[in-house]
Amino acid sequence: MSERRPVSYEDVTGSLRERARDALADAELGGNLKASSASWAAGRARMGEAHPFAEMRDRGREIRRRSVRELPELLDLLEQRVVEAGGVVHRAADGADACRYVARLAHDRGASLVAKSKSMATEEIKLNEALEEAGLRVVETDLGEWIIQLAGDHPSHIIAPAVHLNKDQVADLFATESGAPVPREREALVAHARRRLREVFAAADIGISGVNLAVAESGTVCVVENEGNGRLVTALPRVHVAVMGMERVVRSWSDAAHILQLLPMAAIGDDAAGYVNLITGPRRDDEADGPEEFHLVVVDGGRSALRGTEFEEALDCIRCGACLYSCPMWRSIGGQAYGSPYSGPIGAVLTPLLEGPTSPKAAELPFMSSLCGACHDACPVKIPLHDLLVRARAVAEPPGRGRDRLAISLWSRLWSTRAGYAATRVGARIGARLLGRRGWLSRLPGPGRAWTEQRDLPTRWPPRP
Ligand code: SF4
């Protein structure tokens, strides 16, 4: 069983504009993204009808805002409780520190095989690459992540890493990996993966998981998944390492219960995830199952510097991926073009913040948005993503130099006179008469053409349904 070495994000070539253009030209990718986004939208609509979603979002926002404000205290409490439960906590200043800790632990325990469940934090810190460089074999056990690993690719979506591939493409990858033809039916593909990965669960020396949420008052980490692989990764190997971004903590079980309910509703349009694993320390003396050691690696990686800034709300994210599915940009090109573990609106905000203003992505990603606000409407914890994107643009293009700045200043000059305002209204009406059908413009000339190739433009606000 062989896995291809993961592609490093540094290996992503071309400008964002070039990668986006390539993605737009890929009809198969477009079809796959359209199908997955439609399926998410249908599920999300069902949740809106079945639950008081507006109130739930308000409570979700209140919990996340309060948790980030209390972060230092919550992290101290979490550490204290994890240690009391027999675990070890390592606070890593950055990704390199976290990778060093896990690699050293693996070396000290004589490990050779690592089984991983899905984790965006480990993707962010490039843990797989670090462990492979240290001579370990690392196998992703989440189906989507394993597919991506076999493809030598990186995830397209926060919770659905292989959403840009269809089953025929997956069957080809499995056939290459196993050296034999693989049936192309969905169930057969899942059965194939299960068979191959079972060997890994049984033989792994170390299991590495992410953390969806940590509960400070009890020192518990919550790992949410839909396949059961997370349960095996965290229970079978003799050492379990959980890697979390430092902001993923709440104070109480009451807070956690609400976020754990919101997460699957926003992420997959369902009332509950398949598995919610609640892990408090290693196996106890009177328990039959579980690892002998539990290590919690808490990664800062630039997060603490965001507290108290105009970008602090980015830390509220619960990584549900809803803003990706709702974004017309992401729906058109998928996640890979972003060249970052985090794609879509939250990726366009978070990546420059975590990588720093000198990263080339800081100058590009904040502009990957039409600022339509759909991401804010989709976000279960009401992060004002469109505002954060505008602020990120201001950082990328300081006042006086930016394209947005120029456009806004021209617009404001036009609208600040009675005649200019009237001229824009008349122009809009003429345009609507000439081009609009049922209140929507579907084809614009000149610079507006790129916009209407992907979406229609309303001729009045609010648009007609
Ligand atoms: S920003 Fe909001 S919608 Fe996007 S992944 Fe985070 S929690 Fe989900």
Image (spheres, rainbow, N blue to C red):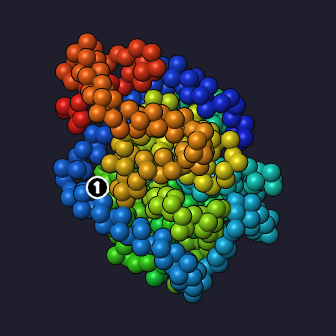
Answer above or below: position of 278 versus 76.
Answer: above
Observer-nearest residue: 44 or 294?
44
Quadrant where the C terminus lies?
A: top left
For the point 46% across and 20% down, which residue is it?
A: 447
Whether label 1 lies within 8 Å of ligand 1 gets the answer: no
Residue in view at x 44 percent, y 78 percent = 251
Dot 1 crowding, Cα within 10 Å, few <14, some 14–19, many 20+ = some
Name the image quarter holding residue 450: top left
Q: Is residue 36 above or below residue 244?
A: above
Q: Does 236 sit left or right of 314 as displayed?
A: right
- Quarter holding the N terminus is top right
Could you tell me which residue is drawn at 38 percent across and 32 percent down?
A: 414
Residue 285, picture quadrant: bottom right
Give how far across and how far down residue 384 sits, in percent. 40, 53
Residue drawn at x 61%, y 79% as measured from the top left: 87
**Label 1 residue SS:** loop
At label 1, the amino acid type is Asp
Does residue 15 appear to the left or right of 323 in the view shown? right
Is residue 157 in view? no
Total labels drawn: 1
Q: Which residue occupies the foreground of this view, 166 or 47? A: 47
Q: Is residue 93 left or right of residue 26?
A: right
Residue named by callout 1: 271
**Quadrant housing residue 15:** top right
> Can residue 337 be seen?
yes
In depth, the one of 298 and 228 nearer the eye is 298
Position in image of residue 377 (x %, y %): 32, 48
Up the image or down, 359 lies above or below 31; here it is below
Residue 422, x across and y down, in percent: 27, 28
Q: Which is more toward the observer, 271 or 24?
A: 24
Position in image of residue 117 (x %, y %): 56, 55
